[in-house]
Image (cartoon, helix red, strand yellow):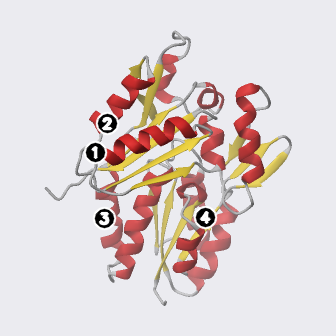
Amino acid sequence: MHTKIHVITDSTSYISKEYLKRYPFLHVVPLTVHFKDTGIEDYIENNCLFMKELAMLGKGGAFPSTSQPPPGKYVEVLSPLVDKGHEIIVITISSKLSGSYESALIAAEIVGGDRISIIDSKNTAAAQRYLLEYTVEGILAGRTRSEIVSHIESKRRHIKLLLMPSDLEHLRRGGRIGGASALLGTVLDIKPILEIDQNGLVNVFDKIRTNKRMFRRLVETVPVDVRRASVAHVADLDRAQEIHRLISQKVHCHVDFCEAGPVLAAHVGPGTSGLIFEKNTDN
């Protein structure tokens, strides 16, 4: 498959390896997780052992940290594509959650960025992946780079990501807690629902006291005619499965289900579920 437009995403979109192989114009630049004096390249390396160890953190232990791709990682991918005359679209995790976006901007300047569009997804995980999939659809349909960028920027504001963490400690330690900092020190029986807002920041969506009420609130929030939806979790299988069951009963589309990848797991910590959906704007 030959195309003049190539797409680069950082690893937090967590596209499947099968999807990546299907489209040779797709490229992934990894973030890194640092855990117990070891650096693990997200998505690229076998992360199963890390995920098992992270799941044990509820019993105490060292907290993992993450780092953005250095500009050089983007340059390694961008440079040969630019030399071959390709146009490029880069889609990154929210610039408020990681420096990946900034690294991509620097790399584009280094290689000469007049044919490169850098898109801040202002989100992550499946929400970022949705934008990537729209980009691929646009390329396959023969749209221009500017048309594709305009389309995904319009779609971006209709995608919502909600988080249900067991606590806020991982977000606090990583400096990604945003407006949710108001919840620190509150009573222990509060079960916060957090959101990544339109600016890409973590904020409070609602404060709930029981799982039952949380489930009800999530079902109320998701429109029946959503275009797509996903449920993800970090060592929170039972609760995530219940969320998936309830949302699947309500909406008309298929609801994806997966375990979150290492970088997101390090950000939010074990015992976290996430719900991602895209509103239908056809009506």
> Quadrant of the rendered structure where residue 75 is?
bottom right
Helix, strand or loop under label 4: helix
Residue 251 picture location, percent across and down: 28, 49
Viewer-side residue, 169 vs 121: 169
Of mark 3 and mark 2, the one earlier in the sequence is 3
Check disc 1 and report its element: helix, strand or loop.
Answer: helix
The x, y position of residue 22, in whole percent, is 53, 79
Cβ atoms under marks 3 and 2 closer than 8 Å:
no
Is residue 53 toward the left or the right of residue 281 in the image? right
The answer to which of 106 and 208 lies nearer the viewer is: 208
Which residue type carries mark 2? Val
CA distance separating discs 2 and 1: 7 Å
* Measured Cα–Cα span from mark 3 to mark 2: 31 Å
Q: What residue does disc 2 label?
A: 219
Distance CA(mark 1)–CA(mark 3): 31 Å
The quadrant holding residue 282 is bottom left
Place of residue 227 in the rendered image (x, y in percent of width and height, measured from the top left) = 29, 56
> Is any part of residue 193 visible from this angle?
yes
- In the rendered structure, the answer to whether residue 231 lies left or right of residue 62 reads left
Mark identifier at residue 150: 3
Q: Which mark is residue 107?
A: 4
Q: Real-space Cα distance between discs 2 and 4? A: 42 Å
Residue 109 vs 48, above or below: the answer is below
Q: Which residue is mark 1?
A: 250
Q: Are marks 2 and 1 in contact (CB under 8 Å)?
A: yes
- Callout 3, which amino acid? Ser
Q: Nearer the viewer, residue 177 or 149?
A: 177
Q: Which residue is found at the position 71% from the left and 46% from the top? A: 51
